[in-house]
Amino acid sequence: MKKQLLFTALLFSAATQAQQLDLTNEPAIGATQTMYLLDTLTDAYPNITGTGVTWDYSNIVGMNMETRVIEILDATTTSFASAFPTSTKVMSIQGAISNYFTSNTSERSSQGFVYEEPAFGTVLATFDVNNETTIQYPFAYGDYFTDNFAGSLAFDFNGFPQTPAATGVAYASIDGQGTLLLPNSTSLSNVIRYKIVDTVFTQVNFIGVMDIEFVRTQYEYYDLANNSLPVFIHTVVSIAQSGGGAALMSQTNVVSSIAPNANLGIQDEAANTFSVYPNPSEGIVTFEGDFAADATATIFDQTGRTVYTVTSLTNGTTIDLSSLNKGIYLVGLTNNGVESTQTVVIK
């Protein structure tokens, strides 16, 4: 009887540990999944790691029931195919990022990505000097690695085309295995969480040369017994001056395969939408947006130091920043409880 119990326990343990990313469960071209866009304040749970853990997203809040499609495309048929001639697949997250890659039995390698960012427009990253390894197959809980990559970027920075060389480092791991709780009493057991942090180092040439870094921190949750595509994704992309200081831009995208029970309305979504013009400016800038009575704006320099504060912000408020040194500043807005940022250049 003890032997039978031991055998059963071993079988259960093996089944629990069987979740791993490998070439056999990599999503095929044509795979697609409709995801629900979530509130950007959704917690990434960076400290919930290990085995037997629970990630509780049962009370997530959606964004007016907006959806995004994740799909695996044939890289040769996309509009950026010429920039990635060796890629075979693309994992595309609608309105966010498209990763171009190839795979074999030992690894998945990225040749670069196309990223849509409000301030920088379309950012095209090609890792043609040295591809980025994003997954080493098989990849299971406890596995991790780092990888160096190199290539170039192409984007507009405040209206100036930039095509700098770029280098980078990636850190990837399976940092957790456990239960993922989603709305509508959805409980997915034996889920694994894939984490990747990749940092791209480059330069922009505007009012002198500035070293900057693009950092993506992405968590993907996989229920491989039922789906080859991730069932939940939390991504933060930030752009900052190398060496620290306030971010020039930070964008969060969170999507779920299960619809949320609660949603922010259109007015809630618009609460953090604003613009500052002209940009670049010689110092006189005007705010445009739908601001609540307690809306405030704070201007930070590249070290994160507060250099100007605006209270009781209204549409059309104009401020004078001409006393500041030339350079790039971060504008942080708090409006109706929602925080957002933009950059402004003083020339």
Image: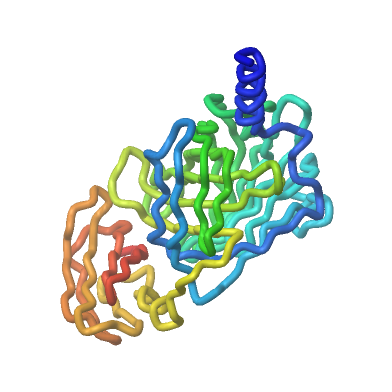
Q: How is the image coloured?
A: rainbow
Percent coordinates x, y for residue 55 in the rendering: 45, 47
Q: Can you say whether 94 is above or below 290 in the image?
A: above
Whether residue 322 is visible to the viewer of this picture, yes or no, is yes
- State the image quarter where residue 330 is shown: bottom left
Outermost residue, top direction? 3
Q: Can you say whether 328 is above or below 227 in the image?
A: below
Q: Residue at x 64, y 13 (%)?
A: 3
Quadrant where the C terminus sits is bottom left
Percent coordinates x, y for residue 310 in the rendering: 18, 73
- State the image quarter where residue 166 is shown: top right
Outermost residue, front direction? 1
Relative depth, front residue between 5 and 166: 5
Q: Residue at x 49, y 70 (%)?
A: 261
Quadrant where the N terminus sits is top right
Percent coordinates x, y for residue 320 in the rendering: 20, 74
Task: Tell me: 248 left or right of 283.
Answer: right
Task: Tell me: 281 left or right of 323.
Answer: right
Whether residue 277 is visible to the viewer of this picture, yes or no, is no
Task: Tell me: 112 left or right of 144.
Answer: right
Percent coordinates x, y for residue 29 in the rendering: 81, 50
Q: Residue at x 39, y 75 (%)?
A: 273
- State the image quarter where residue 126 is shown: top right
Relative depth, front residue between 287 and 207: 287
Q: Residue at x 46, y 58 (%)?
A: 58
Task: Tell me: 17 left or right of 237.
Answer: right
